[in-house]
Amino acid sequence: MISTTTGKNHNTGPGLLSKLKGYFLSGILVSTPILLTIYLVVWIVRVIDDMVRPLVPDSLALEYGYFPGYGLLATLVGATIIGAFVKGFLGRYFISLGEKIVSHMPVIRSIYATIKQISQAVLDKKSSSFREVGLIEYPRTGVWTVCFITGSATGEVQEKTSKEVLNVFVPTTPNPTSGFLLFVPRKDIKILNMSVESGIKMVVSAGVIAPKSPQKEGADKEGKELKVEKKRK
């Protein structure tokens, strides 16, 4: 008998090229964040190593040699020792003496004071800087952007405005370290419940990574618990 199915394509599955293309894209998606993380960590370690290398005595370098990450290790140990030292009376005395000397240097005192204020604002746990994420209408009414609240406006900035304003930092995408400093009335800022880390992820990913709202997370959690209970029954 002559088959009547001649001319029909029985191969309904994906072709070899389609499979390879899918594997390639999956490999890129999985390996890119891993490789970028490794690259950034290695780069940071190398930069610190290059900074610390001139401080290592030649005798120690010849005897023990250099190993990757020694700069980072030296930084961690050194910062811990310095932190323990400045907690004592003698350490506070030397810090105060050093600041007095720096305060008499015209250019250096301005640089030191600025860096000190920024460090205290960002690293101090008691500070309210960079602790909240908000939404403001920027660059025009009806368009919203994510911002980070860095504190309350003080001094002449607050005196010249009729309303209470806050200092907000509007980051750029995908580099959140650059952006714009704005002074926005408190009533015009919508405070978000997301963490600063989640806000930074949203900015870096151009909105691809968006944290769920607390209400949504609660609803999802309740839904999962109900499904588990039904399965048990």
Image (cartoon, rainbow, N blue to C red):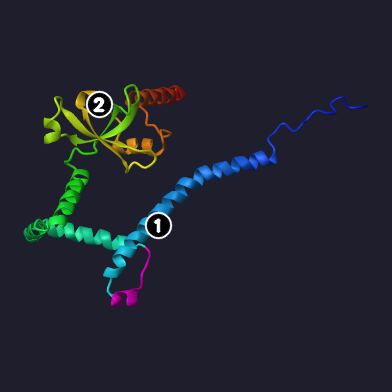
Locate residue 127, reporting x and y percent: 17, 40
Against 137, is 53 above or below? below
Q: Residue at x 64, y 40 (%)?
A: 19
Element carrying mark 2: loop
| Residue nearer the viewer, 128 or 145 | 145
Q: Indicate left or right for 218 with 76 as reference.
A: right
The residue depicted at 37 percent of the width and 31 percent of the height is 211
Determine whether the residue tagged by mark 1 lies in a helix, strand or loop.
helix
Name the residue tied to disc 1: 42
Asked which quadrant contains residue 23, the reply is top right
Q: Which amino acid does label 2 sit on?
A: Ile
Q: Is the magenta stretch mostly helix, strand or loop?
A: helix
Residue 96, quarter of picture: bottom left
Query: Picture coordinates of residue 142 (x, y %)?
Result: 34, 21
Magenta stretch bounds = 58-68
146 or 23: which is nearer to us? 146
Q: Does residue 70 appear in the picture of this structure? A: no
As shown in the figure, which amino acid type bears the numbered disc 1? Val
Disc with the residue nearer the chain's start (1 vs 2):
1
Where does label 2 land, which residue?
Answer: 189
Q: Does the magenta stretch include residue 97?
A: no
